[in-house]
Image (cartoon, rainbow, N blue to C red):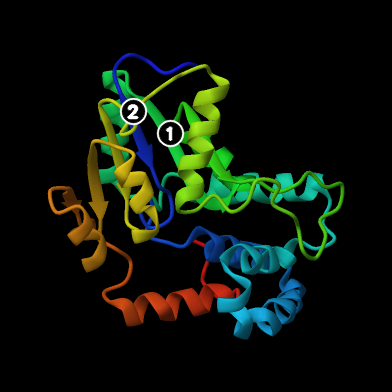
Amino acid sequence: MMPSNKGYALFDLDQTLVPWDMQLLFANWVFHKYPWRRIYLIFFFTLLPLFKLLGAEIMKRAFLCILHGLSAREVESLTQDFVDHYYPDIFYPEIVEKMRAHQERGDFVILTSASPSLYVQKIGHKLGANLTFGTDLNPYEFYPLFPQFPIGNNKGHQKILTLKWWLYLQDKDEQFPLPSSTAYTDSSADIPLIDACQDAVLVHPSERLQNHAPEATVFTPERPFSDKKGQIKIAVTMLAGLYPIR
């Protein structure tokens, strides 16, 4: 679908449309379905001390070891059930309402996330996004221990490269910042996304992010934790596969 003449609205997913790191929530889902798969995290934790050396992309690939040995059909079913279970209950109503307002206005809505496309594409479909970008994995008949990302980790500046690539394929010679555009994010990693748009809406922003976009609208929707300590506690519980599935 080609862009309209109205404008663009670009939405991050994790901690912007939802309060969670979706990769941790998905891992919790996997471990509830396959409790013994926790053993694969030994591979991830073995590499964790080398995080600064290896970088976020390699560590994300290592984290997806939790899918090792599953067939493409099993992963498709697992991710569809995951999205069906959590949508729309865990989404921030205030931010979804902003997306709906853009859709009603005829803006071209893009969901762009660093989380795996395995479930991000399904979320984008449910939200009615015109275009959805996540971190793509190579297609596999059975998932390996260390899956490949054919075009890299869709994070930071990569989100802009992916967007430019898509515009090029559509023969759209848009100038940056995009005309009549708004970026929605919680993360300073998305500063390139903010710079690619005319306006920004920040969700629970850090001081660094708010200082970068001082004129941005700020939303602080209610979260299922009261402080950073509570957020970390829930994240650890998810990583252990012990967070309750409601």
In the image, which disc is placed on residue 110?
1
Q: Nearer the viewer, residue 53 or 87?
A: 53
Q: Is residue 186 above or below residue 138?
A: below
Q: Nearer the viewer, residue 189 or 28?
A: 189
* Residue at numbered disc 2: 8
Q: So how many labels did they put on this image?
A: 2
Rendered image quadrant of residue 63? bottom right
Q: Is residue 227 above or below residue 163?
A: below
Q: Please tell me which residue is depicted at 26% across the width and 20% down the height of the picture.
A: 105
Does the image show residue 206? no
113 to the left or right of 227: right
Q: Please tell me which residue is depicted at 59% across the width and 67% down the height of the picture.
A: 28
Q: Pointers 2 and 1 in contact (CB under 8 A)?
A: yes
Spatial CA distance of label 2 from label 1 is 7 Å
Rendered image quadrant of residue 8? top left
Q: Secondary structure at mark 1?
A: strand
Q: Nearer the viewer, residue 204 or 71?
A: 204
Tell me which amino acid carries mark 2.
Tyr
Q: Please tell me which residue is depicted at 37% across the width and 74% down the height of the picture.
A: 231
Tell me which amino acid carries mark 1.
Ile
Mark 2: few/some/many CA within 10 Å (<14, 14-19, 20+):
many
